[in-house]
Image (cartoon, coloured by chain):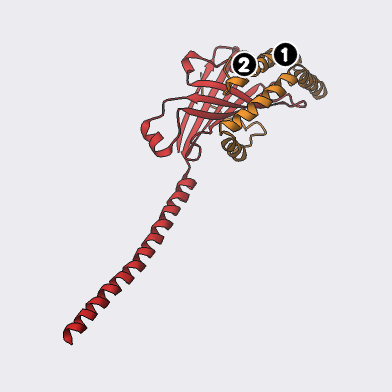
Chain colours: A orange, B red
């Protein structure tokens, strides 16, 4: 697992990553059949989102508490703000034009 | 502006590739990536889409001339936004450099989607662009400074030459007396 940009945050970062990875691997398992209704889908994702918050929310908050300060200290904050303004990317970008691949 | 693109398939199913995304670093083949931090992550309870904002710290030897002209150091940071849509099985990752971004940007997009025979299609595009507007601002500033300096010098030149002419005139007058 990669380190944090701030050595002081690395233990919390790795704990959070491990928590996310365990949750994520379960997340992608096809718990829903292709014929699931929208309502079933929404209920499923709602449950999964809550589960993630319950499992990893605490360590995420602690990690953020550490890393957000480190980002400011490193002087990355203004560059980050500029990048966020230029490309908010709140929604998934449209798919790339199809490319020929084998 | 420069473009780069490539596309190929990974011989692994989409779900494995997307799980693997979070395990890519540290990687001895990509040792320039030295740190990764999640700065924001949300799971949309309606769509199931996971959005993650990360900052990657990179160490890469910068050519001396770039450091001389633009400053910067061996530490460079990249902002990465990824979306994983478990319903449509699309993963997109968009990255842009933070370091030296006032001069040029490298905007990269990666897309993973399922391909036939349990494979995953990978497409990558990048646009590398110098910030022309900023160059223009700098050029405008330089131009303005040059104009001001020219006007100042022209004014001083006039004053100076007037003095010379006056003293010549005076000498001439004195000689005539």
Q: Tag count in the figure?
A: 2
Residue identified by numbered label 2:
B14
- In the picture, measured across the screen, residue A92 lies left or right of residue A97, that is right
Circle 2 — which element? helix
In this rendered view, identify the residue nearer to me: B1 or B43.
B43
In this rendered view, identify the residue nearer to me: B166 or B146.
B166
Q: Tell me which residue sits at (63%, 29%) in the image.
A: A69
Residue B141, position as x, y percentages in the image? 45, 53
Residue A43, position as x, y percentages in the image? 82, 21
Distance of mark 1 from mark 2, alpha carbons?
12 Å
Q: Tell me which residue sits at (73%, 24%) in the image.
A: B48
Quadrant of residue B62 in the image? top left
Specify the farthest residue to the bottom: B177
Q: Which mark is residue B45?
A: none
- In the picture, measured across the screen, residue B122 lies left or right of residue A20, that is left
Residue identified by numbered label 1:
A30
Quadrant of residue A94 in the image? top right
Residue A66, position as x, y percentages in the image? 65, 25
In this rendered view, identify the residue nearer to me: A75 or B19.
A75
Q: Is residue B149 visible?
A: yes
């Amino acid at each position: 697992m990669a380190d944090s940009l701030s050595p002081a945050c690395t233990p919390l970062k790795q704990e959070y990553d491990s928590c996310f990875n365990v949750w994520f691997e379960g997340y992608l398992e096809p718990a829903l059949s292709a014929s699931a209704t929208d309502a079933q889908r929404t209920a499923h994702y709602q449950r999964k989102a809550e589960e993630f918050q319950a499992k990893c929310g605490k360590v995420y908050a602690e990690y953020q508490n550490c890393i957000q300060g480190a980002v400011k200290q490193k002087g990355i904050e203004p560059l980050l703000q500029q990048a966020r303004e230029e490309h908010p990317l709140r929604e998934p970008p449209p798919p790339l034009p199809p490319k020929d691949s084998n | 502006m420069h473009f780069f693109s490539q596309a190929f398939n990974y011989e692994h199913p989409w779900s494995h590739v997307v799980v693997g995304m979070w395990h890519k670093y540290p990687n001895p083949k990509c040792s320039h990536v030295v740190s990764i931090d999640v700065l924001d992550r949300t799971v949309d309870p309606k769509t199931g889409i996971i959005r993650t904002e990360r900052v990657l710290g990179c160490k890469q030897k910068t050519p001396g001339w770039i450091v001389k002209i633009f400053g910067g150091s061996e530490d460079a940071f990249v902002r990465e936004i990824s979306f994983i849509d478990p319903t449509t099985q699309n993963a997109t990752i968009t990255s842009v450099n933070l370091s030296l971004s006032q001069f040029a940007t490298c905007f990269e997009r990666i897309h993973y989607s399922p391909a036939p025979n349990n494979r995953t299609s990978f497409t990558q595009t990048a646009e590398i662009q110098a910030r022309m507007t900023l160059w223009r601002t700098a050029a405008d500033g330089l131009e303005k400074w040059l104009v001001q300096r020219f006007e100042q010098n022209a004014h001083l030149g006039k004053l100076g030459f007037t003095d010379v002419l006056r003293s010549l005139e005076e000498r001439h007058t004195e000689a005539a007396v």
